[in-house]
Image (cartoon, rainbow, N blue to C red):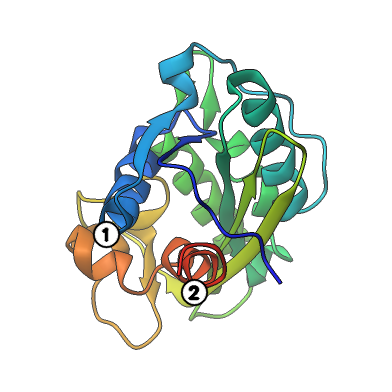
């Protein structure tokens, strides 16, 4: 039986404003006040695990201990079949440049590697998301969601964040970056993980 969330606020263990905006919208119906690790001046811990859940667990517990508040961490990425599941947990790393993260760099690298792989189109991929809700006493609950789709090129859309402009979810004609926030949030990997979280801990 999952632990129920009874506090009125939590801290998102992220510095990604796109994720903060998505999660704030998802928590709105529950009346939960949401802040981010950046609001507390916390730096991101080193992610040393080999899975999305493992890395989310690291981040959630670091922030819960530092703030004394429940913390929710997301670890997510895109897994491309033609690249044997890469970039996977290294999705954000592929975007690192000397002047910060640039996902255009990451998406271009991904597409170049996919084309060089010699695999035939369509290029199947999935977004994966792990959410870990941690309490200051060390307890946590973990949930995972995925959404299947294909990579597209050239990039399409200016909404969303990360790899959204090159990911077209199965059964849809738009990329995530062409969808409204409400449309994306209805089917995204993060939304699926959040549904499991909310069912277990918030209802």
Question: Is residue 105 at least partly visible in the picture?
Answer: yes
Secondary structure under the numbered disc 1 in the rendered image: helix
* Residue 157: assigned label: none
- Residue shown at the point (61%, 22%) measured from the top left: 44
Answer above or below: position of 165 versus 126.
Answer: above
- Residue shown at the point (47%, 15%) measured from the top left: 40
The percent coordinates of residue 88 (x first, y second) are 66, 54
Q: CA distance from mark 1 to mark 2?
A: 23 Å
Q: Residue furthest bottom?
A: 171
Question: Is residue 117 at least partly visible in the picture?
Answer: no
Which mark's residue is nearer the viewer, 1 or 2?
Answer: 1
* 92 or 192: nearer the viewer: 192
For the N terminus, which image quadrant? bottom right
- Residue shown at the point (20%, 56%) measured from the top left: 157
Labels 1 & 2 near each other (Cβ < 8 A):
no
Question: Which residue was labeled with disc 1?
Answer: 29
Question: Which residue was labeled with disc 2?
Answer: 147
Answer above or below: position of 6 versus 190.
Answer: above
């Amino acid at each position: 039986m999952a632990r129920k969330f009874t506090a009125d606020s939590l801290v998102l263990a992220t510095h990604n404003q796109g994720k903060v905006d998505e999660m704030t919208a998802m928590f709105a119906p529950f009346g939960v006040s949401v802040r981010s690790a950046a609001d507390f001046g916390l730096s991101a811990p080193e992610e040393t695990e080999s899975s999305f859940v493992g890395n989310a667990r690291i981040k959630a517990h670091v922030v819960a201990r530092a703030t004394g508040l429940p913390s929710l961490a997301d670890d997510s990425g895109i897994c491309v079949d033609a690249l044997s599941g890469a970039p996977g947990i290294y999705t954000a790393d592929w975007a690192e440049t000397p002047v910060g993260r640039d996902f255009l760099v990451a998406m271009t690298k991904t597409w170049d590697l996919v084309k060089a792989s010699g695999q035939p189109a369509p290029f199947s991929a999935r977004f994966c998301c792990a959410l870990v809700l941690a309490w200051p006493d060390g307890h946590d609950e973990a949930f995972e969601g995925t959404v299947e789709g294909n990579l597209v090129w050239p990039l399409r859309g200016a909404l969303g964040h990360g790899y959204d402009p090159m990911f077209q979810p199965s059964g849809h004609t738009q990329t995530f970056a062409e969808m409204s926030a409400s449309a994306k949030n209805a089917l995204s990997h993060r939304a699926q993980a959040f549904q499991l979280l909310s069912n277990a801990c918030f209802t």
